[in-house]
Image (cartoon, rainbow, N blue to C red):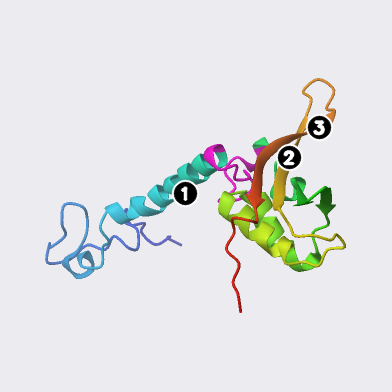
């Protein structure tokens, strides 16, 4: 019993009997379906651009390494969920730390992940709308984003301030009805 002859060509490398195969092995029939070679590199270029953007934001805007593509996420414990925020309402003679309500959890997580001035300012404005047991007008809101760091020798945890912003409310325009 003989085995069938083995062809040196793959199934997709069919030889045109008319001899119209090009130098790269493409036939006239399937040559029109070939994609330009630069498209092969497009996913790689997009991935490199995304990695560079994430690394730049992590260095310049305190973006968590666990976000924005996750490049470098296993090099640090500085995930957005490990960071914490202190919100302090300042009134004449009173300095009160606020508890962030569950209703603002989404805004809080965004501010912890990328603590930009815009996100912290929006969170401060939302916190200023909450009822307070303190009398008097709100002078300012101070927000601080902290991240844990660990001692290299004995792994003792401590915190470091990533970003702090103080928003004076006497300068914020108030919409009048």
Q: Which residues are magenta?
A: 59-74
- Kindly state the secondary structure of the residue where label 3 is placed: strand
- Rate crowding at label 2 as few (under 14), some (14 to 19) or many (20 or more) other CA atoms within 10 Å: many
Q: CA distance from mark 3 to mark 1?
A: 32 Å
Look at the magenta stretch and give its main secondary structure: loop
Quarter of the image holding residue 150? top right
**Direction from residue 92 to residue 67 in the image, left or right:** left
Badge number at residue 147 = 2
**Residue closer to the observer: 9 or 145:** 145
Picture coordinates of residue 120, whole percent (x, y): 64, 53
Picture coordinates of residue 158 (x, y %)?
Answer: 81, 32
Q: Secondary structure at mark 2?
A: strand
Magenta stretch encompasses residue 61: yes
Horizontal arrangement in the rendering, residue 31 relative to residue 117 (left or right): left
Residue labelled with disc 1: 50
**Near-viewer residue (132 or 102):** 132
Q: Is residue 145 above or below residue 127?
A: above
Q: CA distance from mark 2 to mark 1?
A: 24 Å
Q: Position of residue 112 (x, y in %)?
A: 68, 50
Disc 2 to disc 3, C-alpha distance: 8 Å
Which one is closest to the eye, mark 3 or mark 1?
3
Q: Could you tell me which secondary element the residue under label 1 belongs to?
A: helix
Q: Which residue is mark 3?
A: 158
Q: Residue at x 25, y 67 (%)?
A: 33
């Amino acid at each position: 019993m003989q085995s069938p002859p083995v062809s040196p060509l793959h199934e997709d490398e069919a030889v045109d009997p008319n001899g119209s195969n090009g130098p790269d092995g493409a036939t006239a029939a399937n040559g029109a379906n070939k994609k330009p070679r630069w498209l092969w590199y497009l996913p790689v270029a997009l991935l490199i651009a995304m990695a560079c953007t994430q690394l730049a934001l992590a260095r310049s805007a305190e973006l968590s390494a666990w976000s924005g593509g996750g490049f470098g996420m296993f090099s640090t414990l500085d995930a957005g969920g490990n960071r914490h925020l202190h919100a302090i309402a300042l009134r004449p003679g009173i300095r009160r730390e606020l508890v962030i309500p569950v209703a603002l959890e989404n805004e809080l997580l965004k501010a912890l992940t990328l603590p930009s001035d815009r996100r912290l300012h929006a969170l401060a404005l939302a916190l200023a709308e909450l009822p307070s047991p303190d009398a008097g007008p709100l002078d300012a809101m101070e927000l601080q984003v902290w991240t844990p760091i660990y001692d290299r020798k004995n792994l003792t945890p401590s915190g470091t301030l990533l970003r702090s912003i103080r928003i004076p409310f006497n300068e914020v325009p108030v919409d009048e009805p």
